[in-house]
Image: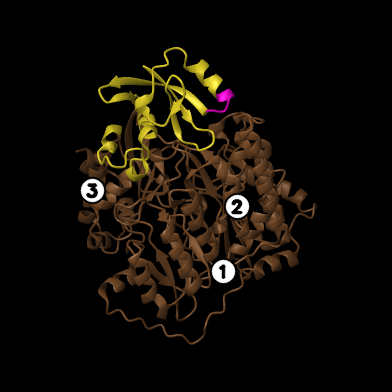
């Protein structure tokens, strides 16, 4: 599957395309198929995202999993500061990255 | 320390307002990201993995207690309560909102700080010795010259769009705490046979993709001719540096391809011209700047006696406190390397404390080191125990300066969009593996430096043990190198063999350290043993 991701223009937060908007939560990302570039261009033009790009991912039981470690780290936050990520209560969240 | 005059302040204030308007236009859609990106980068604002990152300049690594406390305030108010001190003696905030950036820069301007030229192909923050003005063996305080270069290079119209970024260091001791030979230009104050002070000029050093130790281009440059000579160095580079290839654009490539002799010849030819242009700073301006670095009012007749009855304090004294040129005073090294901590990170509370300690005990001055630690340069020996108690209570008194736990690590893939692999978790694992401070002291000076990509912000080329993170088919892999040094005996580390996983490289470091402890001779550091016996025993132990 292909996901569309980028950063929020104002906050810089990592965001994922949900089909109708942007979410900070990877679980809400949807397969953009061949439409990623077009969606990215349209969304960037109206300043809802900064630096959007399409990534490869696979669907797992736990939700989408980006193919590259860089995007997995983007999804959860710095592995060395899980307290600052989106799942601070989950001490195993860093394991998902590897 | 130097304080802004009205021109410095006006320049910085004007830049803040300019960036405020640029940000407004970006948020309003009047500027595209392609248009805005070079503008925000000129103000130190990057877009990293998780958010915008703001890199703040700390000129020659010196800042006041008030400035440190402002950094603490910004960490608390606008970021996630911490900051990261870098190998360029700067500070980075990792979680900045674009909409907040102009306000942050405005607050920084109130304490004479900015983020100008902390990015881009221009002359970056000038670095210097963290012991400047305190080391017994220095020719003179190098920072007035670093400040002169800061003023000269700020918004220099000819050098804002160089082929590539440009880094300068100024030092004044034979002992090199700044990695001066790994800079685009390294300036070392020394004395000639007549006893006059002048600069030894190194040009063409650097790390990154093509690491090089800089050759000497001028053995002795009279101080008064500094600007004219550097103009000549930069002009030759600006004219002939490789703008066609990003990876060959640094001055080290030009110097290497021309050869030091030919580069020197061209610089000297250009120097004859720049000397006719009246570019050098007038003596009264040099004197004005130097007055900002006048020695603080040291007390005379202080005792050198220190009560060492507390064993933990004594350990800290031996490892973290260095000799000062004035009797009764000492230099305190504050460790930002607690075991399993994040190298270079400090919380807002820790920054606040360090600022307060500087104001109370060190003539209101702190220094940031390229090894990502902090220094109080002028402390009365009679205050050391109180300072240690305060630092210890705040987790800032780990006695590991220069030891295996004092690891340099770039932010790596946990934060940086350029990185290929994580650096910090590896530093934490190695520090934990050698967490016993008695073992660390037994091993002696052993500098591990870790970079998460070939750009080498973690100085891995200059590590006694250097580690480079690479991307191998989407997975983190680490190359191990030995024999580098960023000190006066500068050398490049050499890759020992195939790479490792994260756990594998920790094991390999452990085996290399065992080789050292088995084969070292009395008084030898790890680096000395490696240089004496060569790589073979290490390779055998690691790869079998």
The region drawn magenta spans A44-48
The residue pinned by badge 1 equals B139
Figure chain in brown: B
The residue pinned by badge 3 equals B510
**Is residue A46 on the magenta stretch?**
yes
Q: Position of residue B97 (x, y in %)?
A: 52, 42
Residue farthest toward the front in the current orientation of the protein: A20
Quadrant, the C terminus of chain A: top left
The residue pinned by badge 2 equals B114
Q: Position of residue B339 (x, y in %)?
A: 29, 55
The residue depicted at 27 percent of the width and 76 percent of the height is B310
Judged left or right of residue B267, residue B58 is left
Figure chain in yellow: A
Whether B531 is drawn above or below B238: the answer is: below
Which label was assigned to residue B270? none
Judged left or right of residue B8, residue B490 is left
Distance from label 2 to label 3 (Cα)? 42 Å
Task: Check if mark 1 and mark 3 are on a common chain.
Answer: yes
**The disc numbered 1 marks a residue on which chain?**
B
Sequence-first disc among 2 and 3: 2
Question: Crowding near pointer 3: few (<14 within 10 Å), some, many (20+)?
Answer: some
The residue depicted at 30 percent of the width and 20 percent of the height is A59
Regarding residue B194, the answer to whether it shows in the image is yes
């Amino acid at each position: 599957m292909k996901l569309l991701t980028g950063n929020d223009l104002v906050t810089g937060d990592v965001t994922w395309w949900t089909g109708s908007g942007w979410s900070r939560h990877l679980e809400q990302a949807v397969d953009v198929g061949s439409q990623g570039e077009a969606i990215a261009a349209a969304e960037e033009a109206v300043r809802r995202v900064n630096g959007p790009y399409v990534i490869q991912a696979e669907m797992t039981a736990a939700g989408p999993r980006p193919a590259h470690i860089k995007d997995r780290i983007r999804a959860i936050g710095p592995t060395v500061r899980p307290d600052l990520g989106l799942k601070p209560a989950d001490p195993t969240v860093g394991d998902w990255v590897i | 320390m130097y304080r802004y005059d009205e021109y410095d302040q006006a320049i910085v204030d004007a830049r803040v307002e300019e960036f405020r308007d640029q940000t407004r236009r970006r948020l309003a859609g009047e500027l595209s990201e392609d248009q805005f990106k070079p503008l925000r980068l000129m103000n130190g604002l990057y877009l990293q993995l998780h958010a915008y990152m703001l890199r703040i300049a700390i000129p020659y690594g010196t800042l006041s207690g008030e400035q440190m406390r402002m950094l603490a305030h910004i960490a608390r108010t606008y970021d996630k309560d911490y900051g990261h001190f870098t190998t360029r003696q700067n500070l980075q905030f990792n979680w900045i909102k674009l909409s907040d950036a102009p306000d942050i820069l405005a607050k920084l301007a109130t304490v004479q700080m900015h983020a100008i030229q902390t990015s881009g192909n221009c002359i970056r923050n000038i670095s210097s010795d963290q012991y400047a003005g305190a080391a017994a063996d220095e020719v003179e305080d190098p920072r007035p010259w670093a400040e002169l270069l800061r003023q000269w290079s700020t918004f220099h119209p000819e050098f804002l769009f160089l082929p590539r970024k440009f880094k300068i260091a100024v030092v004044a001791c034979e002992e090199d705490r700044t990695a001066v030979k790994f800079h685009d230009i390294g300036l070392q104050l020394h004395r000639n046979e007549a006893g006059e002070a002048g600069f030894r000029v190194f040009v063409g050093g650097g790390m990154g993709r093509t690491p090089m130790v800089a050759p000497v281009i001028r053995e002795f440059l009279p101080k008064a001719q500094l600007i004219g000579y550097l103009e000549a160095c930069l002009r030759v580079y600006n004219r002939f540096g490789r703008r066609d290839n990003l990876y060959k654009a640094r001055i080290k490539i030009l110097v290497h391809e021309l050869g030091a002799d030919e580069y020197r010849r061209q610089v000297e030819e250009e120097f004859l011209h720049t000397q006719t242009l009246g570019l050098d700073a007038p003596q009264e301006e040099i004197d004005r700047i130097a007055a900002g670095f006048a020695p603080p009012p040291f007390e005379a007749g202080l005792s050198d006696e220190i009560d060492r009855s507390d064993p933990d304090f004594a350990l800290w004294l031996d490892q973290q406190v260095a000799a000062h040129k004035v009797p009764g005073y000492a230099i305190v090294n504050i460790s930002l390397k607690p075991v399993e901590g994040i190298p270079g990170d400090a919380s807002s509370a820790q920054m606040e404390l360090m600022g307060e300690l500087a104001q109370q005990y060190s003539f209101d001055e702190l220094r940031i080191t390229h090894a990502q630690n902090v220094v109080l340069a002028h402390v009365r020996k009679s205050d050391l125990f109180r300072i240690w108690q305060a630092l210890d209570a705040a987790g800032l008194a780990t006695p590991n300066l220069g030891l295996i736990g004092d690891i340099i690590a770039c932010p790596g893939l946990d934060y940086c969009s350029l990185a290929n692999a994580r650096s910090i978790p590896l530093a934490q694992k190695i520090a934990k593996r050698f967490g016993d401070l008695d073992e660390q002291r037994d091993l002696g000076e052993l500098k591990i430096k870790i970079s998460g990509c070939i750009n080498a912000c973690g100085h891995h080329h200059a590590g006694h043990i250097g580690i480079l993170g690479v991307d191998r088919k989407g997975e983190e892999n680490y190359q191990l190198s030995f024999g580098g040094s960023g000190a006066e005996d500068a050398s490049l580390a050499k890759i020992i063999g195939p790479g490792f996983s994260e756990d594998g490289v920790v094991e390999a470091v452990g085996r290399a350290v065992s080789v050292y402890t088995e084969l070292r001779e009395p008084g030898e550091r790890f680096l000395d043993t490696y240089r004496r016996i060569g790589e073979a025993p290490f390779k055998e132990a690691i790869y079998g």
